Image (cartoon, helix red, strand yellow):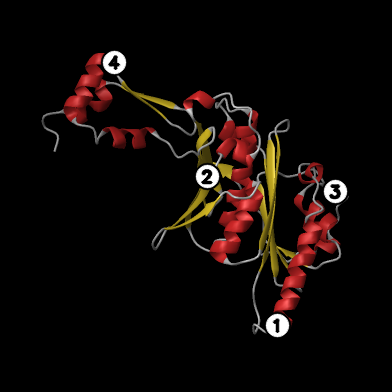
Amino acid sequence: MSNTNVTKVNITKSTIATTDLLNRYLFNDMHVRGELVQLSKSYQSIIKNHNYPIGVRLLLGELMAATCLLSATLKFEGEITVQLQGDGPIGYMSINGDNNQKMRGIAKLKPDQANTKGTSLHELIGKGTMVITIRPAKGEAYQGVVALEQTTLAGCLAHYFEVSEQIPTKIWLFSDDDKQQVAGSLVQLLPDGDGSSENLTKQESDFAHITQLTNTIKADEIFSLEAQALLYRLYHQEKVSLFDPQAVSYQCGCSSDKCLAAISQIEPNEIESILAEQSKISMTCDYCLTTYDFFYDDLKSFISKDKH
């Protein structure tokens, strides 16, 4: 952890945003923590090759930024998946990431909704739910479900923390289709102390103060300023300690070996039948749309009579 007092940061240099980074910080004199994520290349990789309508692209980007912020609130090694599903044009939308901020995501539109003009959360998802699944590397997976009753994804996430975690949390999400960038910020209360009314009042006041400051973020700033410059603009009267930034990257996870492992579960006579008809078995990754082709020589061990 690097203890950088934001009030002393020289913002006359390197004020252009360094994207695909997650920054975490603590307010030294308050029980409040914050996060800032700015994404470009990793987001562009997720939407690349997919002919998503603009509203779908932007919502998927917001969901990606939100998942980065959520994963940073978890103190474990493992994976997190945030999925939206409902009765709207989008059948489901999902972002999967891990504690190393390696992300992948997908949106599946219903067959007759490929050209939807919807842009708002409810226009795209309809009546639905948000499902947050956490899979620690060690221990049992657990899941939280919350209805999408707020008008924005950020509002739904704040509601999730309120009902599931009971931790006051505020989230801001931004997306820019022209720049193909997305960004987000999170402020969260860190309950501490003896539980006295005086202490609780102080904590609530601190949280409200930082929330009010963060609420002044402008889209053009979060997409154009380097993180420390933006934090200085927001919190120059506060004492802030910054953690080292964490890189965010796109990682699909598909591979030829994984496809072969899936094919190995198919009955040998069915593999032979497909090869006889098509001369190959093809598998396309839903996330990156890479197609893997497998021919007889690749699959003969799966249909050999000597297979054990």
Q: CA distance from mark 3 to mark 4?
A: 60 Å
Residue 13 shows which numbered tag? 3
Q: Quadrant of residue 54?
A: top right
Badge 2 vs badge 4, beta-carbon distance below 8 Å: no
> Gap between marks 3 and 2, in whole Å?
45 Å
CA separation, marks 1 and 4? 72 Å
Rate crowding at label 1 as few (under 14), some (14 to 19) or many (20 or more) other CA atoms within 10 Å. Answer: few
- Name which residue type carries label 4: Gln
> Residue, x 46% and y 27% (percent of image)?
290
- Give the CA distance from mark 2 to mark 4: 40 Å
Residue 81 or 11: which is nearer the viewer?
Answer: 81
Residue at image point 30% right, 37% down: 261
As drawn, 148 above or below 181 = below
Find disc 2 in the rendering and name its residue: 128
x then y, percent, for residue 233: 85, 55
Q: Is any part of residue 96 visible from this angle? A: no
Q: Which residue is mark 4?
A: 278
Residue 197 — which label?
A: 1
Q: Amino acid at mark 2?
A: Gly
Q: Nearer the viewer, mark 1 or mark 2?
A: 2
Closer to viewer: mark 3 or mark 1? 1
Residue sitting at the far left: 305
Q: Earlier in the sequence, mark 1 or mark 4?
A: 1
Under tag 1, what secondary structure? helix
Q: Position of residue 98 (x, y in %)?
A: 51, 51
Q: Quadrant of residue 221?
A: top right
Residue positioned 18% across, 29% down in the render: 268
The amino acid type, in three-letter code, at marker 3 is Lys
Image marks 3 and 4: residues in contact by CB distance under 8 Å? no
* Nearer the camera: disc 2 or disc 4: 2
* Left or right of residue 1, residue 87 in this image: left
